[in-house]
Image (cartoon, grey):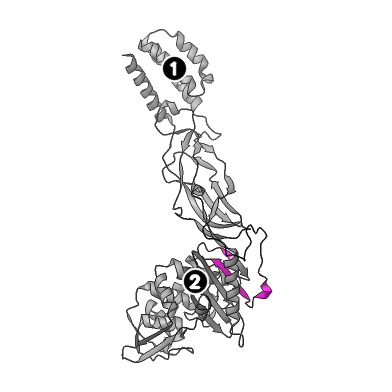
Amino acid sequence: MIWNNHIYFVRNMYGYFFMRKCRRFYKILQRIDRNKAARGVGIAMLTLCLLAAAFPRNCNGQILTHQNLVQKETRQIETKQIETKQKGVAQEGQTQKVELPESELYSKACALIDGESGRLLYGKNELDGMANASTTKIMTCILALESGMCDEAVTVTANAAAQPKVHLGMRENEQFYLKDLLYGLMLESYNDCAVAIAEHVSGSVEEFVKLMNEKAEKLGCEDTHFVTPNGLDGEDEEGEHHTTAYDLCLIMRYCAWESDASEEFLALTQTKNYSFCDLEGQSFSVYNHNSFLDMMDTAITGKTGFTSKAGYCYVAAVEDGQRKYCIALLACGWPDNKNYKWEDAKKLFAYGCDYYHLYQAEESALDLLPIEVGSGVKTGTLEEWGKRSSLKLYVDNGPEDMLFLKADWDDAMIQKEFVNHVALPVEEGDVLGKIYYRIGGEILYSYDICAAEEIKEWNFPAFLRALWQEFTLASQSEM
């Protein structure tokens, strides 16, 4: 009875893998005498034959345990608009891009970005490295806030006291609370406050500047080099103090929304006037010179700047409902053209608000279908032999709400790219590819595509275990 059951099992194995190669051995096995030794030899020979058929080898003699994949797939994202367009501005279904002529802007370089994603919405020489004057101080301010030293007393050094106008007029060895100096820094743009803050936070201006440049690099700034904490023109062995309009927007985006100290930054820069005393009791008052806060109800922060080299500069952030915008203006006129920066700021923000609206990708944009992997095993049974394994995927650290600004003429696309081969074994969490979300051809978000489960490879020991399990179950069923 058991022998007949073994014959029945061998017949069933035709459905598991390449049995044509083994047909001759199967016919021999059917004619084998019931002698136990001969039967064992026959089964062993058949098993070896089946193993040879089931484990194809490449030219190097290595077992092939991977399956080619479709490497790239691109399709359109389904989106829904979060906010309604303003009436009488952008026409519904505006597929032709509306340009803002560069000639209408005074700035030699400027940029408008999406505060949510960092995407460039408009640029004029936005990647040109230029002096940026006191707009530098937004970086000095955010680093000081993040240091957690706001309640500490700052002792003024000779270097800080010697800074040129505009300045608070602090004296060497005079003491102030760091928080008070931040108001002098951002509301009046005092150069001596910037140096005193930098020296207290990092021990020296040189060390603080290193911190500034490290932060800029982390934020994705590609052509920014700080030499001074106050934005005064300077130069070191690595070059002149400069940034680009686009990089400056990225820094403002971080200050306004992304830093753990953003709430403090906004509260500080929105303050109209502020009074404080040094530790000896001498009083000081400072006033906010960012007039743009009164020109646009949606403006939430900003910083002006001027040197004879940089000209008038300005960086600002706006929140219009759920929409977020940042602008940066460099070399926007010289005396007597102090108001040019306000005109350019209004035009850039109007362009962004009129034509770019908030969209959200549908939840299905993050869905990933399983992929098939050859020669894989999950349960270790012969049912899986010769079949492809379905591997579930997930997007690592995908956003809960994928929000972005988009004009009607922009396409929203999703692109998936997989590695050339998926090599077994696959562990849960293994990175198998990338998923990209593109708006207007530009990558806004990118995330890893990972394996959601484990798949092992078929090998000789795994096959023998499955074979033994099948024989054991078959034998028990006949008893």
Residue 307 lies, in percent from the top left, at: 56, 84
In the picture, residue 438 is in which quadrant? bottom right
Residue 170 lies, in percent from the top left, at: 40, 90
Q: Residue drawn at (32%, 79%), measured in percent from left and top?
A: 152
Quarter of the image where the C terminus is located: top left
Numbered circle sitting on residue 279:
none
Quarter of the image where the N terminus is located: top left
Query: So how many labels did they put on this image?
Result: 2
Mark 2 vs 1, N-terminal side: 1
Residue that mark 1 sits on: 10
Side of 199 where 118 appears, left or right:
right
Residue 198 visible: yes
The magenta stretch is 98-120
Q: Residue drawn at (55%, 72%), measured in percent from left and top?
A: 327
Q: Nearer the viewer, residue 213 or 314?
A: 314
Q: Secondary structure at mark 2?
A: helix
